[in-house]
Image (spheres, rainbow, N blue to C red):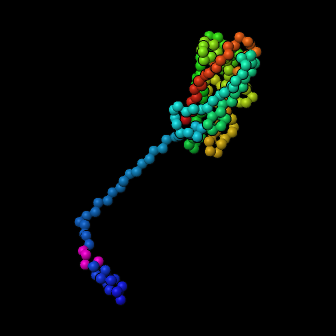
């Protein structure tokens, strides 16, 4: 009985409270926008500058060497991985590296690079970058690197990079020390 009395009182109060009446209504719209531009992930990262593409490490060897090989190893594995928005064309290029020093050891190829001696940058070791493990396709500056044919479903297209030093000639006059080069890379899209 108390429940019926409560419901009756609640119904009576709602009819006793006057409803608000509005004189007019204005309607309109809100425009929401979003512009997405083409984008690429490089080695799984979205950064566009200062990207560390990895290391091409020829290791440690006696200065009396003949041939040394290296493979680019990055944070995502061997080579550079690129995955762009659907139908977005892109390329990967090496844009520059050290200039030739005054004294060069090793064989200078048609697309040479130079590792410079840390204690004397007038001396260096010639080497070449390749896009294949057979060392047959040299990478020249500002030319597209050929994809390796390996595509990762998450990371995208792989661009393998290999390095080779040839012609050390077991030369005992090559100075011992650490030789370095900074290879600049661009992913254009």
Seen from the viewer's position, the closer of residues 52 and 41 is 52
| Main SS of residues in magenta | helix
Reply above or below: 182 against 25.
Answer: above
Seen from the viewer's position, the closer of residues 95 and 64 is 64
Q: Position of residue 114 (x, y in %)?
A: 63, 18
Seen from the viewer's position, the closer of residues 182 and 134 is 182
Reply above or below: 176 against 75.
Answer: above
Q: Position of residue 15 (x, y in %)?
A: 27, 79
Does residue 149 appear in this view? Answer: yes
In the figure, is residue 76 to the left or right of 171? left
* Residue 15 in magenta stretch: yes
Reply above or below: 187 against 2.
Answer: above
Does residue 138 appear in this view? Answer: no
The total number of labels drawn is 0
Q: Residue at x 61, y 32 (%)?
A: 54
What are the residue bounds of the magenta stretch?
14-18
In the rendered image, the residue lying farthest to the bottom is: 1
Q: Position of residue 103 (x, y in %)?
A: 64, 11
* Residue 135 in magenta stretch: no
Quarter of the view holding residue 151: top right
Reply above or below: 159 against 32.
Answer: above
Name the image quarter holding the N terminus: bottom left
Q: Residue at x 66, y 31 (%)?
A: 72
Seen from the viewer's position, the closer of residues 37 and 57 is 57
Name the image quarter holding the C terminus: top right
Q: Residue at x 57, y 26 (%)?
A: 184
Q: Residue at x 62, y 41 (%)?
A: 156
Quarter of the view holding residue 143: top right
Q: Position of residue 12 (x, y in %)?
A: 28, 81
In the figure, is residue 118 to the left or right of 24? right
């Amino acid at each position: 009985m108390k429940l019926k009395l409560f419901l009756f009182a609640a119904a009576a109060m709602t009819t006793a409270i006057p409803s608000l009446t509005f004189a007019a209504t204005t309607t309109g719209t809100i425009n929401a926008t979003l512009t997405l531009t083409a984008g690429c992930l490089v080695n799984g990262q979205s950064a566009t500058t200062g990207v560390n593409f990895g290391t091409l490490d020829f290791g440690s060897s006696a200065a009396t060497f003949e041939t040394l090989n290296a493979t680019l190893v990055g944070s995502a594995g061997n080579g550079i991985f690129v995955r762009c928005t659907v139908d977005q064309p892109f390329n990967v290029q090496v844009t520059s590296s050290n200039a030739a020093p005054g004294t060069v050891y090793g064989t200078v190829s048609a697309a040479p690079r130079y590792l410079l001696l840390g204690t004397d940058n007038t001396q260096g070791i010639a080497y070449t970058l390749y896009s294949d493990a057979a060392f047959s396709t040299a990478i020249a500056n500002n030319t597209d690197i050929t994809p390796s044919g390996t595509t990762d479903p998450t990371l995208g297209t792989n661009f393998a990079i290999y390095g080779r030093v040839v012609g050390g000639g077991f030369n005992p006059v090559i100075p011992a020390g650490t030789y370095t080069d900074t290879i600049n890379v661009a992913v254009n899209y």
